[in-house]
Image (tube, helix red, strand yellow):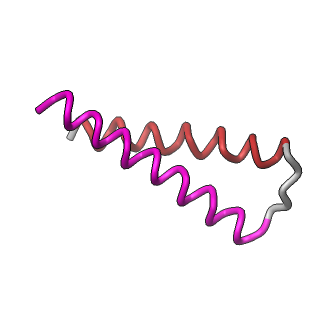
Amino acid sequence: MTSFIISVVAYLIAAFYIKRWLDEIGIPKTMVRGLVIFVLAAVVSYGVAYVVDLVIA
């Protein structure tokens, strides 16, 4: 349960910073941009959950 909560927080933080980064470099808001944000934030979230599982177990 701990890894789930931490990974959700990591997803939200990653999505926020990825959106800001894409805004700064001038990528227009399209469906592809939304998909890129989702995929990259999900990868970060899975990575954080994996690390938390390694540390706790």
* Viewer-proximal residue among 47 and 1: 47
Q: Residue at x 56, y 41 (%)?
A: 14
Left or right: where 29 falls relative to 8: right
State the count of labels. Answer: 0
Q: Which quarter of the rendered picture does the C terminus lie within?
A: top left
Name which quarter of the figure residue 55 lies in. top left
Where residue 46 appears, as percent x and y from the top left, is: 37, 49
Where residue 21 appears, as percent x and y from the top left, is: 75, 42
Residue 35 forms part of the magenta stretch: yes
Where residue 5 appears, as percent x and y from the top left, is: 32, 39
Instruction: Tell me where the magenta segment starts and ends, as one range.
Output: 30-57
Q: Is residue 23 above or below residue 28?
A: above
Q: Residue furthest right?
A: 26
Q: Which quarter of the rendered picture does the N terminus lie within?
A: top left
Q: Residue furthest bottom?
A: 31
Residue 31 forms part of the magenta stretch: yes
Q: Main secondary structure of the magenta part?
A: helix
Name which quarter of the figure residue 4 lies in. top left
Q: Residue furthest left?
A: 57
Q: Residue at x 44, y 37 (%)?
A: 9
Left or right: where 8 falls relative to 31: left
Q: Residue at x 67, y 63 (%)?
A: 34
Left or right: where 49 falls relative to 44: left
